[in-house]
Image (spheres, rainbow, N blue to C red):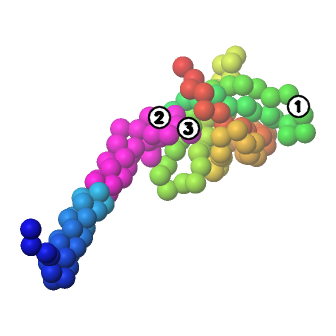
Amino acid sequence: MAKKTKQQDLDTFINDQKKIGKNNSFVGIAILILIAGFYFIKYNFGVKQPGAFFEKADYTVKVYIFAKPDPNSSKSYYIPADVMRSSGDSGYTIETMYWPEGGSTDFSDCSNLQINQFTDCLANDNNMTDYSIMLTNTLAH
């Protein structure tokens, strides 16, 4: 068997590096396709549930909240509310909460709520009641 020259060794090395480069390009393209697919699925076919991993970008859904009419009191109500999620907002917005005996309370500006954190919101009722609201991720029926 003939001995390889330095030039042949160099050519073999360069060809091996080109093969590795092609494999790395394929892996990079595959990762980009997976990321694009993830965002496509998330924003088009996501679930309508606050805090879900594949949460849809824009939706309105009815979930349970904790509402405290007096922020200094320990009494709170576990009631359903209409919650809106918009892709441009940093949190959730409560539009209306529904009382168990009937009736509802609307909010004009109850936004940027986070799950499991109390936030003060001003109601559109006759008394302009200040509620302390905590959003849950439990869907209401």
- How many circles with numbers are drawn on the protein? 3
Identify the amino acid type marked 3.
Answer: Pro
Residue 75 seen in the figure: yes
Q: Nearer the viewer, residue 58 or 3?
A: 3
Q: Quadrant of the N terminus?
A: bottom left
Residue stretch rendered in magenta on the structure: 30-58
- Position of 37 with respect to 138 (left or right) is left
Q: Nearer the viewer, residue 118 or 111?
A: 118
Q: Position of residue 139 (x, y in %)?
A: 56, 26
Q: Position of residue 46 (x, y in %)?
A: 41, 38
Q: Seen from this angle, which residue lies furthest top? A: 101
Q: Position of residue 53 (x, y in %)?
A: 50, 40
- Position of 75 with respect to 57 (left or right) is right
* 10 Å crowding of disc 3: few (<14), some (14-19), many (20+): many
Identify the amino acid type marked 1.
Answer: Ser
The tag earlier along the polypeptide, 2 or 1, is 2
Q: Seen from this angle, which residue lies furthest left? A: 1
Question: Quadrant of residue 103 in the image?
Answer: top right
Mark 2–mark 1 contact, CB under 8 Å? no
User: Is 74 within the magenta?
Assistant: no
Residue picked out by circle 1: 74
SS assignment at label 2: loop
Considering only vertical position in the picture, is 2 above or below 139?
below
Q: Seen from this angle, which residue lies furthest right? A: 72
Residue picked out by circle 2: 48
SS assignment at label 3: loop
Residue at 19% from the left image edge and 82% from the top image edge:
6
Q: Nearer the viewer, residue 63 or 100?
A: 63
Q: Position of residue 72 (x, y in %)?
A: 90, 39
Residue picked out by circle 3: 50
* 10 Å crowding of disc 2: few (<14), some (14-19), many (20+): some
- Position of 114 with respect to 46 (left or right) is right
